[in-house]
């Protein structure tokens, strides 16, 4: 789109992609951390709304100002999608956590595998004046429609779904593992872990006490 529709040079395309990736990294970090405070559902819905509002400057800006729009749009995209994995893990049963997250993403990749063909087909319905003998199409409009639908879908599912913020992943809190291994086995294992930690703490206190009992020097007697 950048080179075909907006006539960006190869260097300008590279800079735009790099800035967009930096925005994605920043968004994933900031929103991921904030979701621990404000909640997963609120963070996903909030940043998806902001991302939807930025779709117009992201897909319709033809100048180099699109670089700034790309940064903030990818900030929102990865901000929302960066929270989704931990949100799914907190909602999933203990014995299926990694299966649910991994399978969900792979099913998403499967569903989106035809998106390039669909975008190309829809883009051909919005032709632009040709560049020499090279046909051009308004892919920005198609991307705007696609991303708007995805944002709406994520907002709807997140709003309707539950949340289990800060759900413990410890073994003794996992009902599936407790049922499979037996409560007595789990309690015995946790007791050994606590005893080990307590023993290590007592050893460090004893070492500190021995260090305080240093030999008295002649100068101290004087």
Image: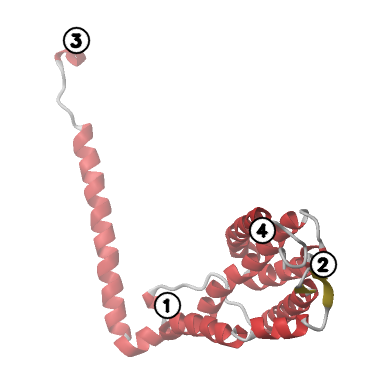
User: What whole-number distance in Å separates the C-alpha atoms at marks 2 and 4?
Assistant: 19 Å
Res 141 → quadrant? bottom right
Q: Mark 4 points at which residue?
A: 13
User: What whole-number distance in Å separates the C-alpha atoms at marks 3 and 1?
Assistant: 61 Å
Return the residue nearer the eye: 43 or 127: 127
Could you say where residue 198 lies in the image, as x and y percent from the top left? 27, 58
Return the residue nearer the eye: 133 or 82: 133
Q: Mark 3 points at which residue?
A: 222
Task: Identify the residue at horizontal 44%, vertical 73% (top origin).
Answer: 169
Question: Which one is closest to the eye, mark 2 or mark 1?
Answer: 2
Q: How many labels does the image show?
A: 4
Cβ atoms at labels 2 and 4 below 8 Å apart: no
**Earlier residue among tags 2 and 1:** 2
Task: Indicate which disc residue 56 carries.
Answer: 2
Determine whether the residue tagged by mark 2 lies in a helix, strand or loop: helix
Could you say where residue 77 lies in the image, as x and y percent from the top left? 66, 68
Give the residue furthest to the front. Answer: 133
Question: Which one is closest to the eye, mark 3 or mark 1?
Answer: 1
User: What whole-number distance in Å separates the C-alpha atoms at marks 2 and 3?
Assistant: 83 Å
**Earlier residue among tags 3 and 4:** 4
User: What whole-number distance in Å separates the C-alpha atoms at marks 3 and 4?
Assistant: 79 Å
**Earlier residue among tags 2 and 3:** 2
Q: Mark 1 points at which residue?
A: 173
Cβ atoms at labels 4 and 1 below 8 Å apart: no
User: What whole-number distance in Å separates the C-alpha atoms at marks 4 and 1?
Assistant: 49 Å
């Amino acid at each position: 789109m950048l080179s075909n529709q907006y006539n960006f040079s190869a260097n300008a395309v590279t800079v735009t992609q790099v800035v967009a990736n930096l925005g994605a990294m920043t968004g994933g970090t900031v929103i991921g951390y904030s979701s621990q405070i404000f909640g997963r559902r609120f963070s996903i819905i909030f940043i998806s709304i902001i991302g939807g509002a930025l779709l117009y400057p992201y897909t319709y800006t033809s100048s180099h100002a699109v670089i700034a729009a790309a940064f903030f749009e990818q900030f929102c995209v990865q901000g929302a999608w960066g929270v989704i994995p931990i949100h799914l893990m907190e909602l999933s049963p203990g014995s299926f956590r990694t299966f649910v997250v991994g399978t969900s993403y792979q099913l998403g990749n499967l569903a989106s595998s035809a998106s390039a063909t669909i975008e190309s087909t829809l883009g051909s319905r919005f032709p632009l004046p040709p560049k020499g003998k090279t046909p051009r199409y308004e892919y920005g409009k198609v991307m705007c429609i696609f991303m708007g639908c995805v944002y709406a879908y994520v907002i709807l599912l997140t709003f309707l779904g539950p949340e289990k913020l800060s759900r413990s992943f410890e073994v003794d809190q996992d009902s599936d593992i407790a049922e499979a291994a037996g409560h007595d086995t789990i309690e015995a294992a946790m007791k050994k872990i606590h005893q080990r930690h307590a023993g290590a703490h007592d050893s460090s206190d004893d070492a500190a006490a021995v260090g305080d009992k240093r030999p008295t020097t002649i100068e101290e007697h004087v």
